[in-house]
Image: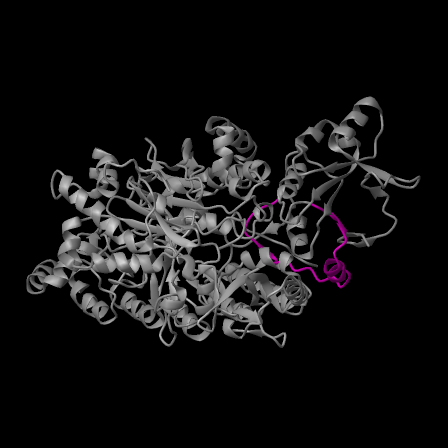
Amino acid sequence: MYRYDEFDHAFVSSRVEQFRDQVGRRLAGELAEDAFKPLRLMNGVYLQLHAYMLRVAIPYGTLNGKQMRMLAHIARKYDRGYGHFTTRQNIQYNWPKLSDTPDILAELASVEMHALQTSGNCIRNVTADHFAGAAADEVADPRPYAEILRQWSSVHPEFSFLPRKFKIAVTGAERDRAAIQVHDIGLHLKKNEEGEIGFAVYVGGGQGRTPMIAKKIKDFLPEEDLLSYTTAIMRVYNLHGRRDNKYKARIKILVHETGAEELARQVEEEFSHLQGTELKLPDADIQAIAAYFAPPALADRAEGWPQLAGWKKQDEAFARWVDQNVKPHKHPDYGMVTISLKPIGGIPGDASDVQMDAIADLAEEFAFDEIRISHEQNVILPHVALADLEPLYRALVAQNLATANAGLITDIIACPGLDYCALANARSIPLAQEISSRFGAAERQAEIGELKIKISGCINACGHHHVGHIGLLGVEKKGAELYQITLGGSGDENTSIGEIIGRGFEPNKVTDAVETIVDTYLGLRTSNEETFLEAYRRVGPQPFKEALYGDAKAEAA
Amino acid sequence: MTRIWRETGFVENDPWVIETEEVKATEDQKPLLPLDEMIARAEESNDVGLGVLIRPADDVRKLEPYLYRIEIVAVDFPAFNDGRAFSHASLLRDRLGYRNELRAVGDVLIDQVPLMLRCGIDSFSVKNATALKRLEEGRLPGIAEHYQPTARHAEKGEGYSWRRRTVTA
Amino acid sequence: MTDKVLTANRLSDGIAVWLDANGHWVEDLQEAIVARHAEAVASLEAIGKRDFAENRVVDVAVVEVQEQDGKLWPLRLRERIRAQGPTMEYAAGYRAADPAFIAV
């Protein structure tokens, strides 16, 4: 993974001191809140219902044991002993004091971490496939390019006061595990016929109030033009994105109102002036950054095969965990492990300081010290020898980190919701807990198969409900919570926005509604192999509407 | 009180003024003309030494034919978080090759001055008390390491082609 | 007119606070001073503005409450959650909100 050089260290130290100065001025009353707010947002400090919230960047979701231990330490020393991993591969702390934030940032800087640009109207964390560098189907590792974009976008003077936040995602395989089509810029790394690396460029995807699927504006952007072309997009957006209405300020609205073709033309025109200038990426630089992401030296560990078979025969729970949470690796003796942060009935995406420390230890022992955070709020150890799965599993069990539910119905994604967030209309977490408990039995989960439930507590869609197979959106109606259900969303390479199926449900009726939907699916699937999403795409919403609302006409809530 | 600041220090007797209903340029002053007015004046006269005010929604590239007659371009930040003028400044310097005075006007705050400098802005119309105080003390909150080339030339930064560094004397 | 209290978040640590009868910002809603007439509300708002300007608190707001079983009970769910904290067990050593208080 990337290692800071002196330049990076100097930058991040200066940044911390700059923020320390800003916080000092704020606390001394020399800086008013309205001027301070964008500055604190650019350092990831939000104000929520109960307290401040600090969002720490985990660039493209990659970190090592030492960094994970620091995250645990911060939870312990400055917060309430836990952290929350997010749908953009970051971590959030819910109880930091403003006066402590400079010290927290200084401690983070000591392990090459920061909270820069995790909020505010600037370029945010560039996210990538959480299986990058390990997945068998990868064309190339997207993370070097995410790292280049991360550096280039750090305190970019021209793009620090955009109309709105800006999110970029990169994927390196045909299977899109980074949801690039619901990002402001989505980059699909590929090779052309000559074997050269470049990107298909998508613009204008997003969720929130007006979910939109990104439009492809360039089929193949050579890698050397990555920064020039991105600058062109950003400049067009900075100048022409709407600033009159916060809810129409993302680039997706600009694409929609201008037309993708015209916008592509404007970008191309700007790009024509920038191509080949000092923004051109020299091959040597790309190779130098890529070298940081070279896969670990994976020794053959063929003894793992019979060992694994033996362990699985002896322990059904272990077998279930392997089948569900371990995916094939490029190297046949290895697997990509998902550590589920979704214990049955637990809070999705939360980890205690003790659990974080344990993950750090296990990563160092079994996983070449490499950890990822997925946008589905789980932890990934991308390189684990099959021969080490059993001891790893035992250690995870001891920390309540061995829930065998990756991709299953209880692997729920939920935003913090009204329990924490000042923007929310309804709670997400208790609903996730209830659904998880209802479907917690292993056999039931196995029977249902892959089913991604995503819950957002408000229209801002931080829970990514629009791309949930079952999406739940919390709204407020007459002072009470109500949940709208959408079906058939997906964030993969065949991105679709979920369809609202009818009237909303009261909190105490939602789990029953989900059960009705699941039972309907089980009743109409063509075989055990037809997933919920496949079945929905085959039959459409009608059977589900009928099951939920009967023959009466269902109006959207 | 509004003062004009440049890296060489505060400027006294600055002649440039933004005209409003109430405020008009006096004998010793010169107006910063809105874009369309400046273009009209340039077309209808042989005047040089013009001053122009670029508002956020203006297309700064329209200045291209008149640059050699312009003494100052003021780019407006009506609210400090309206970042369009950063792009205007960048285009003026980079694309149009504009070399004369480029001034930030409007809601100019100390924390944005380093960003404005990097975009090629070289003079600042400052009202904010904290900003004035910090500028008087010579204490700018910038960082020397930069991760991107910008309109203002900077020394190469170590490591990769996109890095730059501001070297202070 | 419904009864009102004044709430905000403390600048230094962001903790949700309410204004009490002594003009102090306290962490317990139940100690908040209640405004029952328009003039009282106006004076709460004035104090809020002042304390915001003096950098003690941020996000000042007037919140509607009613008295229920001798307790101050915010009308909005959001404010009830603010008063009691997250509505589930979320961290060792910290209590979840009282479900009876939170309920609509």
In this view, the residue farthest toward the right is B27
Q: Position of residue C29 (x, y in %)?
A: 51, 71
Q: Residue at x 40, y 57 (%)?
A: A417
Give the magenta part as a residue range.
B121-150
Q: Nearer the viewer, residue B93 or C45?
A: C45
Q: Nearer the viewer, residue B92 or B33?
A: B33
Q: Position of residue A538 (x, y in %)?
A: 21, 34
- Colouring of the image: one colour
Q: Is residue A301 among what the camera can see?
A: no
For residue B116, above or below residue A193: below
Quadrant showing the C terminus of chain A: top left
Q: Is residue C81 magenta?
A: no
Q: Nearer the viewer, residue B135 or A411?
A: A411
For residue A234, above or below residue B166: above
Quadrant showing the N terminus of chain A: bottom left
Q: Position of residue A35 (x, y in %)?
A: 64, 57
Q: Nearer the viewer, residue A29 or A379?
A: A29
Q: Is residue B110 among what the camera can see?
A: yes
Q: Residue at x 42, y 55 (%)?
A: A59
